[in-house]
Image (cartoon, rainbow, N blue to C red):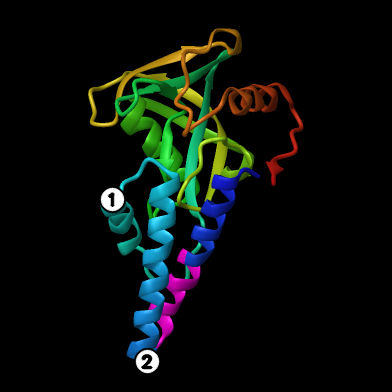
């Protein structure tokens, strides 16, 4: 692990400790100490990422209680031998439909909703492909601990509609993938989805 990445790991651990301390401490002086620890973690993360201090503080200020991993869901929706991808407005690159899982929705409901909102696609989720720890699978660091869940789906139909997150949707073969959004999905992960699709009996991956 590189020098910067190691400091990011320290910062995330400090953030988790301080967040729990702020939530459960009763003594005001202890709360002040935990808030000071959280500020130190924000300073470290701002130094080693491209997120400025104010934005980092806003992100952490919304977190309360015991810290747990965030859940990023991704739909591997297939039509024949092609996979559905969407073009992200934020960076102009392509990804599997998905994003943060919303509360009060099941995994299946979240997948169906994301595909419809981002691609205008009606899908039928079929099986779990993988649950991956983001830090083990991406070069670009994240201030959060994230579990990424990939779900194989059948695409029943697709009619893209204008929305705030994506600008296009399309189907691609593994051999002809467009430029991918590096913080959302990797070529290895899309290859993993194609591999799962080809297997009648598939064992989900988790790390």
Where residue 31 appears, as percent x and y from the top left, is 36, 82
> Which residue is under mark 2?
27
- Residue range corresponding to the magenta coloring: 15-25
On screen, residue 204 versus residue 135, left or right, reads right
Q: Position of residue 149 (x, y in %)?
A: 55, 42
**Residue ID at (53%, 63%):** 13
Outermost top residue: 176
Q: Which of the 4 image quarters holds residue 51?
A: top left
Q: How many marks?
A: 2
Kindly state the secondary structure of the residue where label 1 is placed. helix
Relative to 157, is 175 above or below? above
Q: Nearer the viewer, residue 59 or 37?
A: 37
In front of the other: 56 or 20: 56
Residue underneath mark 1 = 55
In the picture, which quadrant includes the N terminus? Answer: top right
- The image quarter in which residue 116 lies: top left
Q: Is residue 105 magenta?
A: no
Instruction: Residue 193: give x, y in percent of width and height.
Output: 62, 27
Residue beneath the point at 54% across and 43% down: 148
- Dot 1: within a 10 Å radius of its alpha carbon, few (fewer than 14), some, or many (20 or more) residues? few
């Amino acid at each position: 692990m590189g020098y910067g990445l190691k400091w990011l790991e320290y910062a995330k651990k400090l953030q988790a400790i301080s967040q729990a301390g702020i939530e459960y401490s009763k003594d005001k002086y202890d709360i002040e100490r935990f808030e000071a620890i959280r500020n130190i973690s924000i300073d470290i993360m701002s130094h080693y990422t491209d997120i400025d201090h104010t934005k980092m503080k806003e992100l952490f200020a919304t977190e309360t209680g015991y810290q747990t991993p965030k859940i990023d869901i991704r739909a591997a929706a297939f039509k024949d031998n092609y996979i559905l991808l969407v073009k992200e407005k934020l960076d102009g690159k392509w990804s599997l439909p998905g994003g943060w899982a919303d509360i009060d929705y099941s995994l299946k409901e979240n997948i169906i909703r994301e595909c419809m909102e981002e691609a205008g696609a009606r899908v039928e989720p079929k099986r779990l492909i993988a649950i991956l720890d983001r830090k083990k699978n991406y070069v670009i660091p994240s201030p959060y601990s994230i579990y990424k869940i990939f779900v194989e789906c059948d695409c029943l139909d697709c009619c893209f509609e204008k929305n705030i997150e994506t600008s296009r949707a399309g189907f691609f073969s593994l051999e002809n993938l467009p430029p991918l959004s590096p913080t959302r999905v990797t070529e290895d992960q899309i290859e993993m989805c194609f591999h799962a699709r080809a297997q009648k009996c598939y064992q989900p991956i988790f790390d």
